[in-house]
């Protein structure tokens, strides 16, 4: 790990760390000029909600290296060898831009985007274990009182994740990052339904992946990048900043949805049931290149 950074380590003890109130409190009491890093055991398997929070806030998941002589960021460890899980969970992310007004509700978009996978949120909270019943009106009020940026964890039967809202000059962006562990097969029909839902709800972006490094008990240490893309949807604004290459790989298809200038681009990747060694992620980078 880069020793030049003034890292301030916040311990997250135990084999199954959660996003706790004590962790949230520690993040508000940092020494001036320091960069926070959440330090875990090498074998720790944090909850998906905590990992999603770390990623959303650009925090380091620090763990000891193999020899114990240094620390590394477990979120940036490149996958090597076989994946931890033979059968992958389903990871889904998405975001939408709401107008900034009294009628804006946070959470309804997220719940609707999870419908194609036959799961729904039932609980929410700013720390684990989650203490609130999922209620869009209550969630919206909480976010309104915590602007310009805030995050809540949510869960339901076979689903867990993070819901964020940020106020921008254009409106309020609602984003979610969810892990689905019900074993529900991602068929071409299910994928098409999710893509259609993303476009119909005016998503800024949407991703669907197989995750072979996480399950209902958490994210395996150093395994968050064991992901295989199944689909991606880019909204009209993102299309302006992405250079879409013509696909040459078998099983990859591009589709324009809607009418200009309000088109979405849907990218379908091969439907896989096993870890592909990273080839799918490399293909996605090749197809969707950010313009300079």
Image: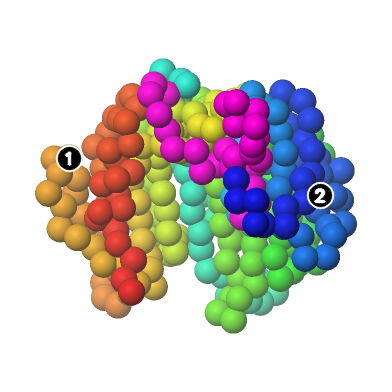
Q: Residue at x 31, y 53 (%)?
A: 285
Q: Residue at x 21, y 54 (%)?
A: 254
Is 116 magenta? The answer is: no
Residue under numbered circle 1: 251
Relative to residue 118, is residue 49 drawn left or right? right
| Front disc: 2 or 1 | 2
Q: Compared to 264, does 266 lie above or below?
A: above
Residues drawn in magenta: 58-83
Relative to residue 107, is residue 233 drawn left or right? left
- Counting from the top left corner in percent of width and height, residue 59 is at 65, 51
How busy is the neighbourhood of tag 1: few (under 14 within 10 Å), some, or many (20 plus)?
Answer: few
- Counting from the top left corner in percent of width and height, residue 131 is at 82, 39
Give the tally of numbered discs. 2
> Residue 44 lies in what quarter of the image?
top right
For the residues labelled 2 and 1, the Cα–Cα distance comes to: 43 Å
Q: Nearer the viewer, residue 129 or 248?
A: 248
Q: Quadrant of the C terminus?
A: bottom left
The residue most toward the bottom is: 169
- Disc 2 to disc 1: CB gap under 8 Å: no
How busy is the neighbourhood of tag 2: few (under 14 within 10 Å), some, or many (20 plus)?
Answer: few
Q: Residue at x 47, y 21 (%)?
A: 84
Residue under numbered circle 2: 24
- The reply to whether residue 116 is in sight is yes
- The reply to whether residue 160 is in sight is no
Relative to residue 223, is residue 83 drawn left or right? left
Q: Compared to 125, does 65 lie above or below?
A: above
- Counting from the top left corner in percent of width and height, residue 1 is at 60, 45
Q: Secondary structure at mark 2?
A: helix
């Amino acid at each position: 790990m880069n020793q030049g950074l003034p890292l301030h380590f916040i311990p997250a003890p135990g084999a199954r760390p959660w996003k706790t109130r004590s962790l949230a409190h520690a993040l508000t009491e940092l020494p001036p000029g320091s960069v926070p890093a959440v330090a875990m055991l090498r074998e720790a398997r944090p909850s998906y909600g905590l990992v999603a929070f770390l990623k959303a806030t650009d925090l380091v998941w620090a763990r000891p290296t193999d020899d114990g002589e240094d620390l590394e960021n477990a979120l940036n460890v490149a996958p090597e060898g076989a994946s931890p899980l033979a059968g992958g969970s389903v990871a889904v992310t998405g975001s939408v831009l709401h107008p900034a007004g009294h009628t804006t509700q946070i959470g309804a978009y997220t719940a609707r985007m999870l419908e194609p996978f036959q799961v729904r949120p039932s609980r929410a909270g700013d720390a684990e274990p989650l203490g609130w019943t999922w209620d869009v009106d209550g969630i919206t009020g909480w976010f309104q009182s915590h602007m310009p940026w805030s995050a809540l964890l949510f869960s339901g039967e076979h689903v867990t994740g993070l819901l964020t809202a940020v106020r921008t000059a254009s409106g309020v962006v609602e984003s979610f990052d969810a892990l689905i562990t019900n074993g529900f097969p991602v068929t071409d029909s299910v994928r098409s339904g999710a893509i259609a839902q993303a476009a119909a709800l005016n998503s800024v972006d949407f991703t669907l992946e197989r995750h072979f490094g996480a399950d209902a008990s958490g994210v395996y240490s150093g395994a968050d990048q064991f992901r295989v893309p199944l689909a991606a949807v880019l909204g009209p604004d993102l299309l302006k900043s992405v250079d879409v290459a013509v696909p040459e790989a078998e099983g990859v298809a591009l589709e324009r949805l809607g009418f200009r200038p309000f088109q979405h681009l849907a990218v379908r990747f091969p439907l896989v049931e096993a870890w592909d060694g990273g080839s799918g992620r490399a293909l996605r980078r090749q197809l969707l290149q950010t313009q300079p």
